[in-house]
Amino acid sequence: MGSLRVLGAARSLRQDDSVLKQTVRPGTAKRMLKFSRPYAGLLSIFLLVVIVDAVAGVASPFVYKDIINNGILKQNVPLIIKLAVLAGALGAFDATLGLAQSYLAAKVGSRIVLLLRTKLFDHIQKMPLAFFTRTQTGALVTRLNTDVSGARTAFTDILSNVVGNLISVALVFGAMFLLSWRITLAAMVLIPLFLFPARWWGRKLQKITRESYDLRAAMNSLMVERFNVAGAQLAKLFGRAQDENREFATKAARVSDITVTQAVYGRLFFMALMLMAYFATALVYGWGGALAAMHILDVGTVVALAALLGRVYGPLAGLSNIQVSLMTALVSFDRVFEVLDLAPMIQEKSNAVAIPRGPARIAFDHVSFRYPTAADVSLASLESIAVPDKLPEKTVLRDVSFVAEPGELVALVGPSGAGKTTITQLVPRLYDVQSGSVAIDGIDVRDATLESLHQRIGTVTQEAHLFHDTIRANLLYAKPDATEEELNEALRAAQISTLVESLPKGLDTLVGERGYRFSGGEKQRLAIARLLLKAPEIVILDEATAHLDSESEAAIQKAFQEALRGRTSLVIAHRLSTILEADRILVVQDGTIVDRGTHAELLERGGLYADLYRRQFANAEVKASASPG
Ligand SMILES: Nc1ncnc2c1ncn2[C@@H]1O[C@H](COP(=O)(O)OP(=O)(O)OP(=O)(O)O)[C@@H](O)[C@H]1O
Ligand SMILES: [Mg+2]
């Protein structure tokens, strides 16, 4: 038990003290406590166990004292046996309580992780799209994972080490004082003599360890670089093998040297802790023994003092690094809170109204828009996960006004980067306008409930995304209570049922990232099936420019017609059939609407539309008329 405690202390001393340089926002400690409030019951049980355990630990040396004084010295064998059994039982009790302690600390810790994780997931889901376009997803996920588990480790550490050790140390010293205050004082003076060097060596060890990682990394990257084909070829062509060997040997030698230093410091560190234990014990036996020989102290007390002392270095060493443990916890929690504190830019007003069902009218009124910067999304402080802004802010849309009457098909055409996709993103409120307004049925989208917006508007993007799940699950995402019949009907209308039926597992085929690979056009049709299930009043369609081969063209066109029928629709058009059917075409250039009208009107007027038509659409016309049928 003693050496285990020393080892635990060694781990705590080696904890990275670079956290001490970090600053934590005020109030973090209070919030951290608030997070543990739901577990107040468990925590009190934990504290109780810690106290009882510490008392049990202090009790056994007193049993030894009795064995010696009243048993051995008075030749009372039955008492010796009784007390020895008691000491054994106390040990078993102590071990069991230790287990209970670990269990409780782990339980509270993992409950807190659960709470933090679900809170974070929920919060991040509420973030506007701008948050995700400006976030490095990988970095965000890693950060949330490490911070959340950091928070847990720190919490468990504080609970079991800091609280447990404090109680142990206090009780042990109290008991020692009762036995002999002089020897206890002397031992207490001795302890810092060794604890300070141990701390110093612990820090040094940390630094050396970090350095050894760097040296190893340098050596490894040299190997990786030289052993790949291009590197090997270069070395051979230039005949530099000798120099290469020398360089590698230098790096490898440095690694070898630091390994030795590391071993020595590791041992020194451990040695300081062990020496402290040996010397303090020697002191107790030496001085205490002398006093016992002079009949000032009894023998049992000396042995009890030595045994008590054995229980104090571990907790003491652990406590000597208390600031690092506390700071690690605070920093982890602070970083989690930082993410929780990001206010979602797009929020529902408290008095938001639901957009009534039924035919919808979309109106853009003098809309100006620019994409939010990282600072707008309040991500600027999270450098490690935010994508820094390199480009100057620029206005993407200027003075855009138009109306789509109920059931109308409005087509957006224009050169790449003109702002077509941006216009469509303002309707479901993926972004908010800077000035002007976007309204559905006369209700500004900023005054509408988010739920009603999501229900009324269906979108099929250029790159239709499917979750890594079955086709059925992807479809049910739009309408969780859809019947089998409804699913099949949607697939049929979207012109994709033949394909789905031909798959061995049908609707239960896995799609997405690592599943069945649909082509771009097939994916879009599946997305249309999803949209049909949702049956929104407004449809936003970003026609794909790619996968417009004649094969799926006809199917996609039919699927689109199905999706648009009777609905107010905003379509970014890349195909001739769409612009021919459109009630109105908006020509977008550089973020403004430069012309509007029907195909015939616009063509007659000439200008940008006629140009675009010749380049983009007339081509399709030729292709369409060339293909038989
Ligand atoms: N998330 C974003 N953050 C900042 N700027 C953006 C963002 N998305 C688009 N932009 C910029 O806004 C402008 C309009 O982009 P948009 O995607 O609306 O063009 P588009 O007309 O749909 O083009 P395409 O036909 O190529 O799809 C472009 O200059 C683009 O660089
Ligand atoms: Mg676009």
Image (spheres, helix red, strand yellow):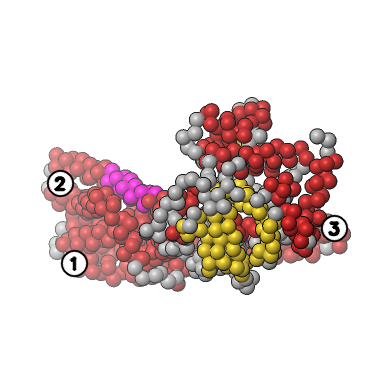
Q: Which residue is under mark 3?
A: 236
Q: Is ligand 1 within 8 Å of the beta carbon of the residue shown at mark 2?
A: no
First in residue order: circle 1 vs circle 2: 2
Please tell me which residue is depicted at 61% across the width and 52% down the height of the picture. 570
Q: Which residue is under mark 1?
A: 181
The vertical placement of 337 against 491, above or below, is below
**Label 1 crowd bin: few (<14), some (14–19), many (20+), radius 10 Å:** some
Q: Which residue is under mark 2?
A: 71
Residue kind at label 2, given as amino acid type? Gly
Query: Is the C-beta separation of discs 1 and 2 under 8 Å?
Result: no
First in residue order: circle 3 vs circle 1: 1
Q: Which residues are magenta?
A: 95-114
**Residue 174 falls left or right of residue 372:** left
Examine the structure image and report whether residue 96 is included in the region drawn in magenta.
yes
Q: To which quarter of the image does residue 598 belong?
A: bottom right
Cα separation, mark 1 vs mark 2, equals 25 Å
